[in-house]
Image (tube, helix red, strand yellow):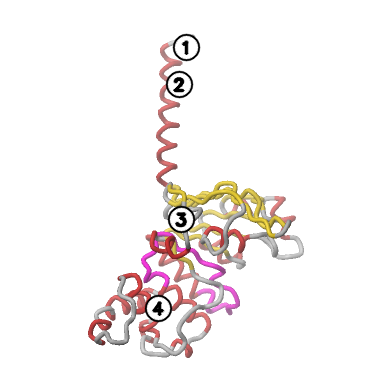
């Protein structure tokens, strides 16, 4: 039987666990539970359990064939899981369509830059703003109606460092600046969670630095989940990192923790260095 001191200590511990449980529930904005994907007998993702905390930058990394892109496509609902569940702010969104997720605040970019090449930089962002405002483009609309979005579009371009190129055609931009424009159009959708698919893929050092700085800026008031192969970018930007190998979670933690993990080092042997 507990004495008064022991009972008090137990009550305090239980109270702290309850408070911590409530806090964790509030902090977890995106979660997967036993998420799996099988392609004709090949298990690409196997029982992946992720918790993405609100206001953090979280990376999915792993050697080639680890399942990170498949996992990312499952989370963003571009492919359907074989089993498991996805929760956003505590709600089961496993069966939601990508467009529905976007309206809820989960918005993704793509590894291949997706812009309208023969529209101006400003017009690209304005189209995204029209969609968010629920005013799709109609050829009979007055230009004055569309011009009402210009101020917001220019603010977004300033956020990504493209304000001086507002009138340029998107096709004229360098690859890195096209990615910056795509991020601007993604932000125009007002995401609560920004999902980035290899945002620095195929870039030179200068463009990598530009995009990394941009992600840091936009992450100040958002949650970011990114698949990224550039480990220098991951080390610089990410609060938490999940390492996948053969479709399963191999390790999770800060960069300092995963970079000294023996299993992670072995997984990357011959592929790269952590």
Q: Is residue 62 above or below residue 88?
A: below
Task: Find out whether the residues at labels 1 and 4 contact each other: C-beta distance under 8 Å.
Answer: no
Q: Is residue 153 above or below residue 224?
A: below
Quarter where residue 62 is shown: bottom right
Distance Cα–Cα, label 2 vs label 3: 33 Å
Q: Nearer the viewer, residue 81 or 258?
A: 81
User: What residue is at 46 percent from the left and 67 percent from the top?
Assistant: 215
Q: Earlier in the sequence, mark 2 or mark 1?
A: 1
* Residue identified by numbered label 1: 2
Task: Find out whether the residues at labels 2 and 1 contact each other: C-beta distance under 8 Å.
Answer: yes
User: What residue is at 56 percent from the left and 52 percent from the top?
Assistant: 254
* Residue identified by numbered label 2: 10
Q: Nearer the viewer, residue 170 or 7?
A: 170
147 vs 95, left or right, is left
* Mark 2 element type: helix
Distance Cα–Cα, label 2 vs label 1: 9 Å
In the image, which residues are magenta?
186-209
* Mark 3 element type: loop
Is 194 one of the magenta-colored residues? yes
* Residue identified by numbered label 3: 56
């Amino acid at each position: 039987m507990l004495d008064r001191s022991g009972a008090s200590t137990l009550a305090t511990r239980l109270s702290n666990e309850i408070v911590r449980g409530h806090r964790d529930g509030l902090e977890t904005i995106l979660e997967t539970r036993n998420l799996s994907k099988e392609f004709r007998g090949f298990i690409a993702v196997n029982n992946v359990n992720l918790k993405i905390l609100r206001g953090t930058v979280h990376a999915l990394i792993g050697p080639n064939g680890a399942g990170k892109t498949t996992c990312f496509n499952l989370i963003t609902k571009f492919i359907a899981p074989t089993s498991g569940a996805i929760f956003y702010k505590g709600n089961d969104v496993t069966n939601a369509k990508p467009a529905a997720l976007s309206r809820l605040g989960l918005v993704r970019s793509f590894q291949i830059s997706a812009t309208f090449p023969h529209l101006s930089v400003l017009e690209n962002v304005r189209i995204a703003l029209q969609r968010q405002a629920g005013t799709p483009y109609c050829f009979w609309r007055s230009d004055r109606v569309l011009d009402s979005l210009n101020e917001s579009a220019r603010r977004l371009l300033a956020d990504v460092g493209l304000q001086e190129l507002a009138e340029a055609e998107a096709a004229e931009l360098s690859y890195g600046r096209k990615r910056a424009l795509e991020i601007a159009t993604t932000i125009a959708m007002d995401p609560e969670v920004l999902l980035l698919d290899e945002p620095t893929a195929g870039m030179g050092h200068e463009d990598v630095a530009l995009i990394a700085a941009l992600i840091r800026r936009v992450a100040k008031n958002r949650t970011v989940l990114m698949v990224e192969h550039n480990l220098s970018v991951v080390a610089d930007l990410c609060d938490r990192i999940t390492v996948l190998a053969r479709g399963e979670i191999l390790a999770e933690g800060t960069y300092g923790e995963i970079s000294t993990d023996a299993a992670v080092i072995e997984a990357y042997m011959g592929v790269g260095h952590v």
